[in-house]
Image: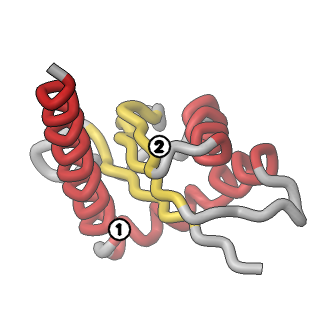
Amino acid sequence: MRYITLALLLVSCNAMAGDMATRVAAGNMAMATAEGQAYDRSLAPAIQSAMMVCAPPGQPVDRFVLVGDIDTAGGLSRVAVEPATPLSRCFAEKLSAQPLPVLPRAPRGTGAYPLTVEMDVTQ
């Protein structure tokens, strides 16, 4: 019975990793456009605000990745972080709680803008 549980856990982890990689790639593709780069720059104050609460200056920051979907009104949903640490979960909570800039338009065929934030702060 233990082997079945372990096998199911491994399958679940692999599926989540694949979904995360797909979502990171979608966010990176959206940011690769001129419109995406401009929108990404408009997110900087919200990202900085969330990080200041979760990691005050001088506190070490480990690398993490956040993915989410921004709706046309600027709401963030379907948020996931990897790895899930106290810092990354705090960042996800604070970023999700604030209104983000309204999208210029969602990518074709979707109702949301795929967001990827790759946090890697070096001191």
According to the image, label 1 marks what residue? 31
Q: In the rendered view, how is the structure colored?
A: secondary structure
> What residue is at 34 percent from the left and 75 percent from the top?
34
Residue 64 - label = none
Q: Quadrant of the N terminus?
A: top left
Residue underneath mark 2: 102
> Who's the residue at 44% across and 50% down the image?
82
- Residue placed farthest to the top in the image? 1
Kind of residue at disc 1:
Met
Placement of 60 over or under 112, stated as above or below: below
Q: Is residue 27 above or below residue 76?
A: below
Does residue 81 appear left or right of residue 104 in this picture? right
Q: Position of residue 88 (x, y in %)?
A: 59, 46
For the residues marked 2 and 1, what is the alpha-carbon distance in whole angstroms? 15 Å
Instruction: Give the quarter of the figure containing the C terminus.
Output: bottom right
Q: Amino acid at mark 2?
A: Val
